[in-house]
Amino acid sequence: MTASGPAPVTLAEVRAAAELLDGVVRRTPVLASRALSDAAGVPVLLKAENLQRAGSFKVRGAYVRMARLSEDEKARGVVAASAGNHAQGVALAARLLGLRAVVYMPVDAALPKVAATRDYGAEVRLVGASVDEALVAARAESDRTGAVLIHPFDHADVVAGQGTLGLELLEQVPDVRTVLVPAGGGGLVAGAATVLAELAPEVRVVAVQTQRVPAFAESMRAGHPVAVPVKPTMADGIAVGRPGDVPFEVLQRLGVEVREVSEEDLSHALLLVAERSKLVVEPAGAAGVAALLAAGSAEEGSFEGPVVAVLSGGNIDPLVLLRVIRHGMVAAGRYLKMRVMLDDRPGALARLLGELAGLGGNIMHIDHTRTDVGLGLNDVWVPMQIETKGPEHCDEIVSRLREVGYRVVRD
């Protein structure tokens, strides 16, 4: 920071960062997606940063920031706060540079992310319910011990390091017209926007946030960084309550557009990327794809192609992945949740199951409810979840059951 505001981030600094990262990070692939291209009506490619070392883009900025420390600063070690990706990036960079690292993570951070951070050699301390609370503890540790705080996004060196992704992207897709970037604190999108504004000003850069924590959207409306409540979201990697001053300055100055996506958008995107592109991506990492799917191919709100959606990370707890896939299947119309009212008499359930079998529905879960308010003495609700072939099949099942006299309520 300077007296007049955040330190500027320039293309020259991003190029210098790229030299530092030569041989340290992977040049991640860009993969064409026919399924997404069909959905958007324009060519769509995926920048697979989920395949980066430590599973996300974060090692780029962490390594650049730490490599530029003085010898005295390196001797004092580093401290960081993260829900997982920055933690692993800092831990890996510290190991490569021979530094001691302490990382504060929220108490409910995904266990695989905690384990990976420790495996890279960092000391992990679980504190608070969010990244913002963990960051308070990390700052206190820095003040107490002299360890250098490696902020996840609010430093020019970090933004410059993340911006090296933009250099790669332009070399790989020189005719790109739209770039969709997940945004939490804003380091990645600020770095990419810095590069693209200088080298390809015709390219539209879009920062994508979750509706649950729309810190950038609110800050853009206010004209300065503001804090918003951090609500529970599957996209924990971008659940940041306040944008960084450095990234905000870049996005505001360059007029970067901000879009928000829902939990349903995120789970649908994650499912599609896993199923059609064979890539494991965490919900935050799929935010760009979620924005693409939410926009669809309609003229209003759509994107000019070729579009590159940055898959920013792939570190996801398998248990979370299971829940998100189920959520995504519901959002995509692959699961039908409904209640059917039956007469509470022998054979009624068997007849219902026969109808469903004839319609090709695969029952995943079924229950009986006899005590709901409003049920008659001989009535029973049968809540169920059915695996289907898609939205049209769901409609077909419900319509057929109603045609033969069942009362059906979709949940």
Image (spheres, helix red, strand yellow):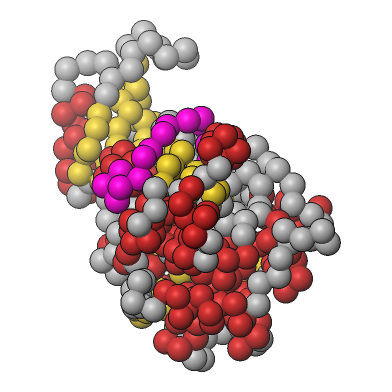
Residue 153 visible (yes or no): yes
- 118 up-or-down from 181: above or below: above
Which of 119/244 is in front? 119
Residue stretch in magenta: 118-134
Q: Residue furthest front?
A: 72
**Residue at position x 65%, y 37% from top?**
229
**Residue at position x 26%, y 47% from top?**
119
Q: Quadrant of the N terminus?
A: bottom right
In the image, residue 41 lies in the stretch drawn in magenta: no
Q: Quadrant of the C terminus?
A: top left
Horizontal side of 123 relative to 388 (left or right) equals right
Q: Residue furthest top?
A: 377
The part of the image, by quadrant, that contains residue 24 is bottom left
- 198 up-or-down from 300: above or below: below
In the image, residue 127 lies in the stretch drawn in magenta: yes
Which of 283/40 is in front? 283
Residue 180 visible (yes or no): no
Q: Position of residue 12 (x, y in %)?
A: 61, 82
Horizontal side of 18 relative to 326 (left or right) equals right
- 112 up-or-down from 275: above or below: above
Which of 264/151 is in front? 151
Horizontal side of 12 relative to 74 (left or right) equals right
Q: Position of residue 316 (x, y in %)?
A: 33, 49
Q: Position of residue 231 (x, y in %)?
A: 57, 37
Q: Position of residue 133 (x, y in %)?
A: 57, 34
